[in-house]
Image (tube, rainbow, N blue to C red):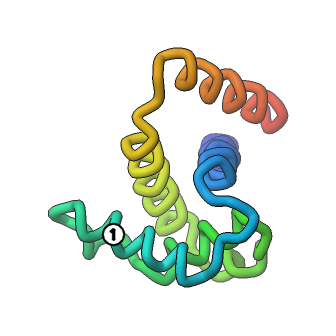
Amino acid sequence: MDRGRQVIGAVFAIAVNGRFGPDTTPADVAQFVASARAGYEEGDSIPALETEGLIRAALGEAELADNISPDVALGAELFVLTKILQDANPTPEQLNAFVTEAEQTAAEYM
């Protein structure tokens, strides 16, 4: 399962870096997470601080993910991936490009 988590983590990083620009602030990330959690009936099940930390880690503050358990990270990454893809509403071509990039990244971990 470690490989699967690594692949999901890599795909998560691709999606996060595609969604957030280089000038993203911690407040921007917190607002995104709060909005995403508010949009889901079971939003409280995803811990806000850990989710924010994972996003910020993918944006370059890697140490913020150091103390997040793998199970919490997996759930938060899948939650954020779903939200980013829903918000982007990609065309079939954009989705294919994303999947291709994800496959290439996954191949590096396999």
Using a 10 Å C-alpha cutoff, classify the residue at mark 1 as few (fewer than 14 neighbours), some (14 to 19) or many (20 or more). Answer: few
Name the residue nearer the viewer: 33 or 79: 33
**Above or below, comparing residue 11 to residue 106 in the picture:** below
Q: Residue at x 33, y 69 (%)?
A: 35
| Horizontal relation, residue 85 to residue 57: left or right | left
**Above or below, comparing residue 25 to residue 10 in the picture:** below
Viewer can see residue 14: yes
**Above or below, comparing residue 9 to residue 69 in the picture:** above
**Quadrant of the image occupied by residue 41:** bottom left
**Residue 57 location (% of width, % of height):** 70, 70
**Residue 95 location (% of width, % of height):** 53, 24
Farthest residue toward the front? 23
For badge 1, the amino acid type reads Ser
Name the residue nearer the viewer: 81 or 30: 30
**Above or below, comparing residue 11 to residue 17 in the picture:** above
**Image quadrant containing the C terminus:** top right
Which residue corresponds to mark 1?
A: 35
SS type, badge 1: helix
